[in-house]
Amino acid sequence: MNGSESFTDRANPGALISFVVPIYNEELTLPHLLPALDAEVFSKLTQSHELILVNDGSRDGSLPALLELERSRHDVRVVNLSRNFGHQIAVTAGMDAARGDAVVIMDADMQDPPRVCLELIEEWVKGSDVVYAQRRTRQDTLFKKATAAAFYKSLSHLADINIPENTGDFRLMSRSVVDELARYGEHDRFLRGMAAHVGFTQKAVPFDRDERIAGETGYPLRKMLKLSADGILGFSKVPLQLISRLGFFVAGVSLLGIIYAIVTKFFFPQIAVAGWAFTVVAIFFVGGIQLIMLGILGSYIGRIFEEVKGRPLYSIDDSFRRRS
Ligand code: UDP
Ligand code: MG
């Protein structure tokens, strides 16, 4: 926040709030989303608003529906990505397009209840820069709940910074935070980690996460695993440090083996020959460990490779770009 702006300005019609919603195959949820946003959020705001809908390479009828919305409403802008880049990149594209003094990120499927946006905005008006919605409860499959719980537990153990548990990307960020995040050039993006990393005044708002209103999840297991890896590899060096810890452990074990060999040779020579099983097991054990560790090294090298390439994060298909 700059010196001339006071927090009360944040409640004025002069303040603009951008709502960023990533869209991947959401033709069934769109007819629910807009009326809900209008009734529960837009009509109640004292500020001005804009709605940025980012089409992340949908394969269904989402794009024509979005373009129709853009034509018929003055408050809607569509950013159309040239293919499916994934949720985190779609949100980034929306944040880059947003012009608001505050930016609210939410899902299209109404799992992030629109009415909670008002509470997020209220905290921003009071002076917070990052207001994240924190799940009290969630309506998801048992599998999703269990894997998410395991992920947040390991992340909080491993991460260098404190990433709040049970938060998704449903949050509000002030202009300063959005501008700062635009300077984070990493390609494997884990926005909730980056938003924690950036600092500023952070505030949690508890909420109950609903079920998806229609359609299917765009986050199959494969994408969930990629996101977890981005969270852990992007915010922790512990997997790398494991290599040396394990190295010490394996060295310790082999030392015990040497002591065993010496003791049997000098004191129990009658049992000293049966060594082949030990040798074979040891070779497999060490080989396995080496492969695991090489895998971890590989993950980091893969990330270095991604960054060094310096590719743009996304490309916008400009045949539909709004001329404004
Ligand atoms: N999404 C996206 N790109 C993708 C997958 C999902 O933009 O590759 C969007 C999707 O349209 C929705 C949000 O990200 O607005 C959250 O996705 P979803 O509800 O499918 O995930 P879940 O809630 O099951 O984790
Ligand atoms: Mg969802």
Image: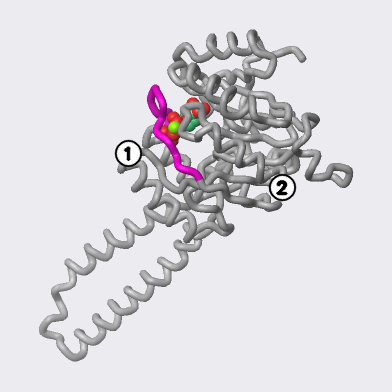
Q: Quadrant of the N terminus?
A: top right
Q: Is residue 173 magenta?
A: no
Query: At 49% from the left edge and 44% from the top edge, which residue is drawn?
Result: 207
Q: Nearer the viewer, residue 140 or 220?
A: 140
Percent position of residue 320, x then y: 64, 11
Question: Which residue sits furthest left?
Answer: 270
Label at residue 310: none
Q: Nearer the viewer, residue 73 or 98?
A: 73
Residue 310 shown left or right of residue 111 in the figure: right
Q: Is mark 1 within 8 Å of ligand 1?
A: no
Q: Nearer the viewer, residue 275 or 106?
A: 106
Which residue is tagged 2? Answer: 126
Which residue is tagged 1? Answer: 141
User: Which residues make up the magenta segment?
Assistant: 207-219
Circle 2: residue type: Lys
Q: Quadrant of residue 184?
A: top right
C-beta proximity under 8 Å, tags 1 and 2: no
Percent position of residue 43, x then y: 64, 25
Question: Which residue sits furthest bottom?
Answer: 267
Residue 113 shown left or right of residue 125 in the figure: left
Disc 1 secondary structure class: loop
Circle 1: residue type: Thr
Query: At 51% from the left edge and 23% from the top edge, which residue is drawn?
Result: 33
